Image (cartoon, coloured by chain):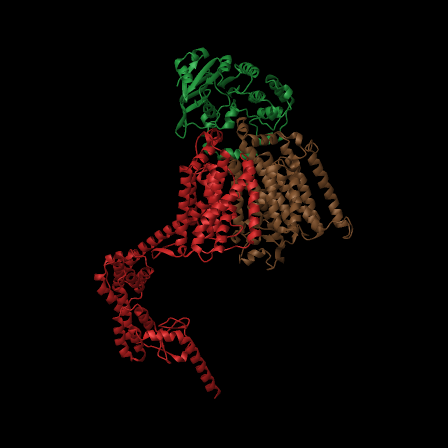
Amino acid sequence: MTSLLRGDRGGWILFALVILLMVYIPIGNLALSADHPLYVSTYTVTLLGKYLCFALLALSLDLVWGYLGILSLGHGAFFALGGYAMGMYLMRQIGDRGVYGNPELPDFMVFLNWDALPWYWYGFDQFWFAMLMVVLVPGVLAFVFGALAFRSRVTGVYLSIMTQALTYALMLAFFRNEMGFGGNNGLTDFKDILGFDIQADSTRIGLFLASGFALLAGYLACRSIVTSRLGRVAVAVRDGEDRVRFLGYSVTKVKLAIFTFSAVLAGIAGALYVPQVGIINPGEFTPVKSIELVVWVALGGRATLYGAVLGAVTVNYLKTEFTGLMPEAWLFALGALFVLVTLFFPRGLAGFRLPWKSAK
Amino acid sequence: MKYLDSLREFMRPDRVFDVVYRPESAHVDIAQRDILYIEDLTVSFDGFRAINNLNLYIEAGELRCLIGPNGAGKTTLLDILTGKTKPDSGSAWFGRNIDLLRLKEPEIANLGIGRKFQKPTVFENHTVLVNLELAMFGGESVWSTWRGRISGEQNDRIGGVLEQIGLAEQRDVLAGSLSHGQKQWLEIGMLLMQSPILLLVDEPVAGMTHQEMDRTAELLRSLAGEHTVVVVEHDMEFVRSIADRVTVLHQGSVLAEGSMEAVQNNPEVVEVYLGE
Amino acid sequence: MPAFFFHAVAAFLLLAIITIAATPLAAAQDAGASDPFYEQAKTLVDASLKDRRGIVEQLAASDDPRLIPLLRHLLEGDLYYSKEDGELLVVDGDTDAVTSWLTDEAVEIGKSDRKKITTNNQLRGLLRDLIARLQLTNDDATVRYNAVRQLLGEEDDDTTETIRELIASEDDRETRELMQVVLDFERLSKEEQVEDDLFQRLSRRLEPEVKNKLTAYAESASPAMASNAADALEKIDARVRFYGHIETIFFGLSLGSVLVLAAIGLAITFGVMGVINMAHGELIMLGAYTTWVIQQWMPSNVGAALLLSIPAAFLVAGFVGVLIERLVIRYLYGRPLETLLATFGISLILQQAVRTIFSPLNRSVVSPSWMSGTLEINSVLALTNNRLVIIGFCLAVFALLSLVMQRTRLGLEVRAVSQNRPMARAMGIRSERVDMLTFGLGSGVAGIAGVALSQLTNVGPNLGQGYIIDSFMVVVFGGVGNLWGTLVSGFTLGIANKFLEPWSGSVLAKILILVFIILFIQKRPRGLFPQKGRAVEA
């Protein structure tokens, strides 16, 4: 681990902070009484847990955008797919406690007068199977899409628009009731996860800790790519794809491997996000969500992994504050953020600390 | 990854049946003296024939210069040889046994054909050392690029090339901050890391000072013999200083071929360069 | 006693109402004095059933335009008279609403105070025959055609007889053919054996009545005749299917026009200039809002407001486009991904601005009358006017834009700059100004697309979002930098979409199209009509 973080001061600070939170938050929430000045409310726990998931998502995007030069506008879709896989498991855990009391079918299927579970819902009552799908579904989609796109050398803006079209198509599909994923309302009303009550404070803490671990593990995994020769090849691909090809590397394979891995990370982030917020619906597929997360990375500073985390937390904190105080101003602020960051801070927040490293 | 790779290989349309597929032998067969056979090559863009029925043979180990006015098809020829452009008709063989037109860019690179671009294209966000390292491991699988580390022996090789191209002191400098000439040498260095059999060098001295040009000439001459070198260049003085044989291209086909002196006295060449 | 009293009050009140209401009516009655047709019609009231026949025949000799409606009311049993003053009344069979026959004004009258002018079978036969004959001998061929068309399937012996008399003298071909159908129907009903020609004739008709008649006939006729009828039915079905395809293509063209309109501005900014403008959809939205605002200003003149909206939307969207270009995009040339992000930010700001200014609710723009209605080609194919107008509008915009790009100084400069910027500058073209104007032009065209869209959907802050991805798909599919490609690709996608819809549903059709384009781009990354050559590589 230490070798992976060598020379990564931002990474060290991030690790210190996340580990500190992972120690303090459980104590602050479970051990202290509600009137203690250091008490942490369950709301805050969930909020921080959400930020950690977003940070992991931002990390996954930074890996492909910052290091590989692929501006994916489809990472929100991978995130949502992971979320849906988890949501399907949680739906099956409800069992006969739903409104209609059907032991087999989720409420929305009873409502649609379906008499049997669709085949693609089989197996989701098993946690291990659902977790496998959290990894496989986004991974396979990214692999197939990437294989098609990278092979025929769709690059740059074209690729971005293709990923956006993919997201858009998925959104349209998931809005349909006939798809069997709850349509407009998505999946919600979860009861418990692995037998623990999903509303309980201790479960929330567990999920928070899981998100923390996932973020740190994801960070290390990304570091191991970025610091390896693969990472250097990736940067070379970003800066001059043709040149890399002439050196004899298979650019397609490099892109495919990193893109697929990144989609899996996004899927895991989604899977951790869903039990904490208690709902997953097709709104997660809207193209706006996918682009919004690009601005997290842009603000934090692309091609610095800790920058992506910093950006995700900053923007989401601002969003929480804004939507609380004056909701209608949030889109103005977000829009302005897009414009200002691209015009004036192309290197993002992380760029402020690295003036001596700027190449151009 | 290995399985995915073999799956992809399996899915390749031209390799549906292994029985039918005849793998290219890795070793180029140069028993017949020549290393490059280009015959009847034609390619056109929007009706414009960039290469027109071109015939060209390059001997193994020689240093050949290709000259010709703008639009003569020099760069397009290199594009075809490296797999970037597919010609409309004709053939291009590497040695007697390898059909270049059937291969893709990385495969061609792995056969031992290296190319230096017109504009220096080094990886500006990497150091000189990393640039050479990347060049050395070209053709590696994704898995080994991720897990691989540099051995001591490989480090020595990089050191050797750094000496050869005169950038030993700039080892840890970002390539983006090198001077123009240094970038050109770095790129030649990157070519050398690939241990190429054939080097295709596109305008190596454009924008160089005289001293830099002399060093480049020296460098290229030292490479010939061990490697086959094809240089595309505009600067006549530089060409005279390095070339064994010169080929003049005009409107996509060979106009003249021979020693620099013979070519310069060829009336057709004189007309193309001076006339009109 | 109280009942009587109540009736008396009611009668008095009624009288009072009639007196008040009859003030203008009285004037009409005065006029009636010099209205012989009306006077004659009134004699129906007191005549016996037998006399009514005579009166009707006399009336029929008149050429008064009220004749046919009067006869029809009589035939359908809608003609009443007031017991009070013998005034002729018309009672709507469904709603029981009473109107005066003479003035067409509503009349309040109790059921017990009016009486139907009765008819018998004989009289009704006469009436039907008279009406048919009157219409069938009308000078206007359309009236005659419509009369036969209405008779079809409801013909009886009398009307058939009338038609048999008139068919020889009918000089309008379509009416004559339709008359022949009526005669053919009779033969189908009455004759055991009919010749092939008759089925041949009927198989060319598309009227649903013909289909019904043949279906019924096929069930009851002898096997040989039934199979003839079945053949004819099959031919009819084939033709109906054919016109169904034509209709689908028409729907596809109209959807394609919308796509082309939405995409063509993008084809300029993205295709020619290489600028990724994610706020393109919002420029369309601004155009639609401009239309709405102008309509608010002049609500009484919908058509003029719409025509005025076209230049206005062009200016508004074009101005905003120029602002975007000057303030943001020009600092980002050559950095397409950054441009994408910045313009996306702008799209968010524009959306929220519209939400704040106009409210987040959808607004609906009224369509002028010349855009409603349909153009009827035959019984199974009718083209709606608004779709026709949109298709025409799309082609006009396209033609105008091509003209601008091919024939004007600006178009020349735009093409020069897009092909080789340094060279164009060296030739003295002010490339900055060209960038600004090109972007303004593309944005203005987006605004015009908004005007068209406002006629088809509601105008709301999210209007543009729905079109941005479609627009990019159209441009990418057609080949970047190629206006023709955009036109062909828009129409192709529109038609493909409409053909997929019946068996996949509209959402799935859209998804299938998206997937198709994603796959298509794999095979032909530069679209349907790629630009070739060296310049593209750069």
Res. B254 visible in picture: yes
In this rendered view, identify the residue nearer to me: C205 or C262: C262
Residue B218 horizontal/vertical position (percent) = 55, 14
User: Which chain shows up in green?
Assistant: B
Say whether residue A144 is left or right of residue C530: right
The residue depicted at 39 percent of the width and 29 percent of the height is B47
Residue A350 horizontal/vertical position (percent) = 66, 36
The residue depicted at 38 percent of the width and 74 percent of the height is C25
Q: How many marks?
A: 0
Q: Where C28 sits versus B129, above or below? A: below
**What shade has chain C been given?**
red
Q: Where A335 sits versus B35, above or below? A: below
In this rendered view, identify the residue nearer to me: B186 or B96: B186
Residue C490 horizontal/vertical position (percent) = 43, 44
Where on the picture, by quarter, is residue C27? bottom left
Res. A294 visible in picture: no
The residue depicted at 69 percent of the width and 35 percent of the height is A10
Q: Where A247 sits versus C163, above or below? A: above
In this rendered view, identify the residue nearer to me: C44 or C429: C429
Say whether residue C197 is left or right of residue A303: left
In this rendered view, identify the residue nearer to me: C173 or A130: C173
Residue C65 horizontal/vertical position (percent) = 30, 67
**What shade has chain A been given?**
brown
